[in-house]
Image (tube, helix red, strand yellow):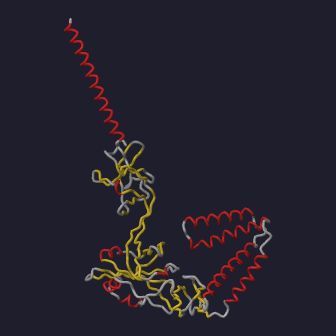
């Protein structure tokens, strides 16, 4: 009887131990499965439309067809840098008293105010909806200037807003007009103008684009010297800052409608110009927008391992006229397509492709690479299933993740 009870208790303990063991094994299995599911993290990026550039850094020198404008002293410029002038245009006036510069600024301010108020009165009978829209647009433009820190256009944006606001007030009867204000400003303006009469003036002796010496000192270098430079000689020039001249000039007038850039690069870089006749050129920090240019000449020199590149551009503005010795960025070609992270590239059965996430499934999609840089691939924009590149716009590309396979679960 006692042996039977002992065996029953032992069997019960064994059953409990087995149950506990089974529970532990089940828990371990569940934990492993949860870890496999929850620990399977994937990083994805959306395939977006993008434009990529094939660029080349090119140190060089910009040269213009220009003539110096004699003049020195305390100059007050009456034209903006980059402004187109004609023969006889007054470019600057010579101040004999520091107060005269302040008077010129006052005169300019009064002229703007008078012009603004005069235009404001020319709105009687205008459509109120149109005037309200113009006021709103002028306000939005002013806010955009503030948001983008485009302070160079701030004055014009403020004037446009005030003009639209004044016209709305006159048209709605909130203001009876600005005749009295204009008359008072005109009296101030006449007094300021009288104080500046008799000053010596510097005028343009030819037509062209003006740039002040204070804004851009010309290089003490002729274009003929640059044309005759070998690639090695041009490279030697660029190893140190070039001398400038024009200390006794008020500025320069660029007479041509084009300018040239003489740059130097390695022979390997020069090979990238093969078959290229049109490029774009930009100088970061001075001219951020790329300008169209023509490849005039690529002159290789096997002995030095260098090549001289001559470009010509037909765009002239205030930014361009500041160019001298520069580190230019040359855009050799521009490509448009679908951008994919380079980390997503895989080779499966000898074919290049990426894994795309469709719901909870992975799908391998073949790709054709149009262009690439250090971080991204650019695929043809018209890629479709069944063609060389199967990735479509806005596909969710798997950049990183475990157990990638066609048809696998995400």
Considering only vertical position in the picture, is 26 above or below 345? Answer: above
* Foreground residue among 16 and 2: 2
* Foreground residue among 295 and 169: 169
Q: Position of residue 327 (x, y in %)?
A: 40, 77
Considering only vertical position in the picture, is 11 above or below 145? Answer: above
Q: Where is residue 402 in the image (x, y as percent from the top left)?
A: 32, 46
Q: Where is residue 82 in the image (x, y as percent from the top left)?
A: 54, 82
Considering only vertical position in the picture, is 213 above or below 153? Answer: below
Q: Which residue lies furthest to the top in this view?
A: 1
* Foreground residue among 55 and 151: 151
Q: Where is residue 41 in the image (x, y as percent from the top left)?
A: 36, 45
| The quadrant where residue 34 appears | top left
Query: Position of 388 compared to 73: left or right?
Result: left
**Rendered residue at 43%/60% (across/down):** 337
Query: Position of 228 compared to 96: left or right?
Result: left
Query: Position of 251 compared to 120: left or right?
Result: left
| The quadrant where residue 4 appears | top left
**Rendered residue at 76%/76% (across/down):** 181
**Rendered residue at 79%/76% (across/down):** 180
Quadrant in which the N terminus appears? top left
């Amino acid at each position: 009887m006692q042996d039977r009870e002992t065996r029953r208790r032992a069997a019960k303990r064994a059953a409990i131990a087995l149950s506990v063991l089974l529970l532990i094994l089940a828990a371990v299995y569940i934990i492993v499965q949860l870890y496999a599911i929850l620990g399977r993290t994937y990083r994805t990026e959306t395939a977006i439309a993008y434009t990529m550039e094939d660029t080349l850094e090119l140190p060089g020198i910009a040269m213009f067809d220009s003539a110096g404008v004699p003049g020195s002293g305390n100059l007050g410029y009456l034209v903006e840098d980059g402004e187109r002038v004609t023969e006889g245009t007054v470019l600057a006036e010579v101040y004999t008293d520091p107060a005269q510069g302040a008077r010129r600024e006052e005169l300019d301010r009064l002229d703007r105010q008078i012009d603004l108020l005069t235009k404001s009165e020319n709105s009687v009978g205008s459509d109120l909806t149109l005037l309200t829209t113009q006021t709103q647009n002028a306000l939005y433009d002013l806010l955009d200037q503030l948001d983008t820190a485009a302070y160079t256009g701030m004055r014009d944006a403020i004037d446009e807003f005030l003009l639209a606001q004044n016209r709305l007030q006159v048209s709605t009867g909130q203001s009876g007009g600005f005749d009295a204000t204009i008359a008072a400003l005109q009296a101030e303006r006449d007094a300021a103008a009288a104080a500046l009469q008799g000053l010596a003036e510097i005028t343009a002796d030819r037509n062209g684009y003006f740039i002040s010496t204070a804004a851009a000192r010309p290089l003490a270098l002729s274009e003929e010297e640059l044309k005759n430079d070998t690639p090695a000689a041009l490279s030697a020039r660029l190893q140190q800052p070039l001398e400038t001249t024009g200390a006794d000039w008020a500025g320069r007038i660029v007479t041509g409608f084009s300018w040239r850039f003489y740059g130097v690069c390695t022979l390997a870089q020069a090979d990238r110009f093969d078959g290229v006749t049109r490029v774009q050129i930009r100088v970061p920090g001075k001219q951020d927008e790329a300008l169209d240019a023509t490849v005039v000449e690529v002159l290789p020199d096997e002995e030095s391992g260098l090549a001289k590149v001559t470009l010509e551009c037909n765009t002239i503005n205030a930014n361009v006229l500041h160019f001298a010795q520069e580190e230019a960025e040359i855009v050799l070609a521009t490509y448009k397509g679908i951008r994919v992270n380079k980390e997503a590239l895989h080779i499966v059965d000898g074919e290049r492709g990426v894994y795309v996430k469709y719901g909870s499934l992975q799908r391998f999609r073949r790709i054709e690479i149009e262009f690439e840089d250090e971080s991204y691939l650019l695929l043809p924009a018209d890629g479709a299933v069944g063609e060389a590149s199967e990735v479509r716009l806005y596909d969710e590309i798997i950049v990183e993740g475990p157990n990638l396979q066609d048809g696998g679960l995400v």
